[in-house]
Amino acid sequence: MIKNLFIIPLFLLVSSPLKATVHEILVWDGYMQFLPSNLTSVQLGDTIEWHPLDIPTMVHTITSTNIPLGATPFDQIWQAPLDTFFRYIPTKIGTHEYVCTPHIANGMIGNFTVEDINLSITNNPFSFKPAVFPNPSNDYIQFSSEFNNLEFFIYELSGRLVISGISSFNFDISKLNSGIYYLVIAASEPEKIKLIIK
């Protein structure tokens, strides 16, 4: 019985979803603006939320105009006495531009840029520490004790997230196709490793 009490919290900890950042954009009715109108440093999996800065007295929209290829378009009507918000989770890297269609002439436009910060080679080069082995591998990887029990992410070369989880001694990667991937370990300073699957 006591053993089960320890297993349940451990299961909940391991199975809980990874945290993503929520970025807030305010819809300012009075001066017909999005604040901020230019949002950067958004990562894949983050959430963008538009909230009213003041009580809307007219109809606004949050309408995508120019977004990356394959991204989901959006067109949200914002009307008084609406006091809720619109939420969007980007799935593609690049700049997403949007407008308020009734007030585009008033400059009510905005954009947010989804960056692949985890894979920036120039700003944060790949680690040469033996954080995982074997590398290359075809069935499992082991994390060194220094990097055990930390969040990690595996990306394709395109930047698409394919696996995330908590690092453990043996982690199954047998479902990945052969090729080169980027492994990011969320240590105090993120470790970026080129992972080769045979």
Image (cartoon, rainbow, N blue to C red):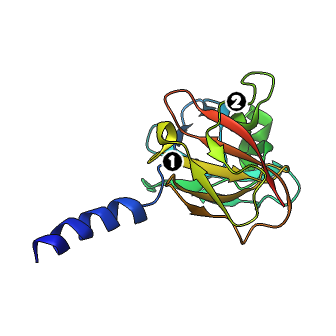
The answer to whether residue 111 shows anywhere in this view is no
The answer to whether residue 7 shows anywhere in this view is yes
Residue drawn 71% across and 56% down?
A: 91
Please tell me which of labels 1 and 2 falls first in the chain.
2
Residue 110 place in picture, x, y as percent:
72, 36
Q: Which mark is residue 60?
A: none
Residue 40 place in picture, x, y as percent:
68, 31
Report the side of 66 relative to 48 (left or right).
Answer: right
Residue 97 place in picture, x, y as percent:
78, 43
Amino acid type, callout 2: Ser
Residue drawn 51% across and 52% down?
A: 167
Amino acid type, callout 1: Glu
Q: Residue furthest front?
A: 134
Q: Tag 2: Cα neighbours inside 10 Å, few (<14), some, or many (≥20)?
A: few
Q: Tag 1: Cα neighbours inside 10 Å, few (<14), some, or many (≥20)?
A: some
Residue ID for mark 1: 151
Is 65 or 190 nearer to us in this picture? 190
Q: Residue furthest bottom?
A: 1
Q: Quadrant of the N terminus?
A: bottom left
Residue drawn 71% across and 39% down?
A: 193
161 vs 30: above or below? below
Please tell me in which quadrant of the rendered image residue 190 appears. top right
Report the side of 85 relative to 197 (left or right).
Answer: left
Residue drawn 40% across and 61% down?
A: 14
For the residues marked 1 and 2, what is the alpha-carbon distance in whole angstroms?
A: 16 Å
Residue ID for mark 2: 127
